[in-house]
Amino acid sequence: MTRHPLDVVPSGLRGSERSVAVPPVARPAVAALVSSWEFKRRAGFEVPGERPSPGVEGTLAKRLLGIRFAEPVRVVWAEASGFGYETRPGHPIYGEESFVLGDDGVFTARSVSRPATWTWRLLTPVLRMLQHRVFGSYIRIVEDEIRRATAATEDR
């Protein structure tokens, strides 16, 4: 669902999409970053050890208020310029998330989701706030990588 622009979001799910233009000099570095779990690690998650590959399952984890939340996931697609995963049973959110650097040089993070259970639905406002923060960190991570790549080019 999230591999391409969110023209239509299935009923009952909420779509989110954030993008940033990546200059040509930084595209190789950003593509390498967003095609690996390093991207999620920099966003504050514990990540699986192996590279994202279609069909591979793993667990992301995040600590909030001293509580470790395990988030089972399965990679649904992966390529040199990004990957996408779906949540698995036990994840607080039901849905899919992806990160891709398009041929046009635009990085986009997308998600389609809803709380996974009625218990998590009670916390919908908190989950949305956390998702908004995480998406902001995705953009900051890509902008930092752009700055690093640009500085490295200028230092030559």
Image: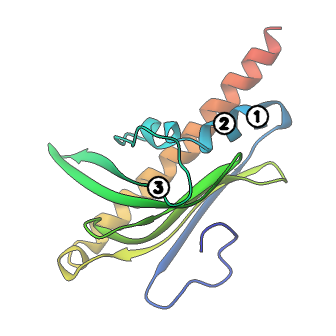
Q: How crowded is mark 1: few (under 14 residues within 10 Å), some or many (20 or more)?
A: some
Q: Which of marks 1 and 3 is nearer the N terminus?
A: 1
Residue found 56% across the figure and 58% down from its top: 54
SS state under label 1 = helix
**Front residue of this view, candidates 14 and 91:** 91
From the top left corner, tell me how far across and down residue 108 is, in percent.
Answer: 66, 56
Report whether 79 appears left or right of 27.
Answer: left
Q: Name the residue at 85% across, 36% down.
A: 24
Q: What residue type is labelled 3?
A: Val
* Disc number placed over residue 56 in the picture, else none: 3
Q: Dot 1 corresponds to which residue?
A: 28
Check the image and report above or below for 101 versus 41: below
Q: Residue at x 22, y 53 (%)?
A: 69
Q: Which residue is drawn at 60% across and 31% down?
A: 144
Badge 3, how many Cα within 10 Å: few under 14, some, many 20+?
some
**Viewer-nearest of discs 2 and 3:** 3
Structural distance between the alpha carbons of marks 2 and 1: 6 Å
| Label drawn at residue 88 | none
Figure check: 60 above or below 141: below
Which label sits on residue 32?
Answer: 2
Kindly report which numbered mark, 1 or 3, lies closer to the viewer in this rendering. 3
The answer to whether the residue labelled 2 contacts the one labelled 1, judged by CB atoms less than 8 Å apart, is: yes
Q: Please provide percent x and percent y for residue 127.
A: 31, 65
Is 28 left or right of 17, judged from the image as shown? right
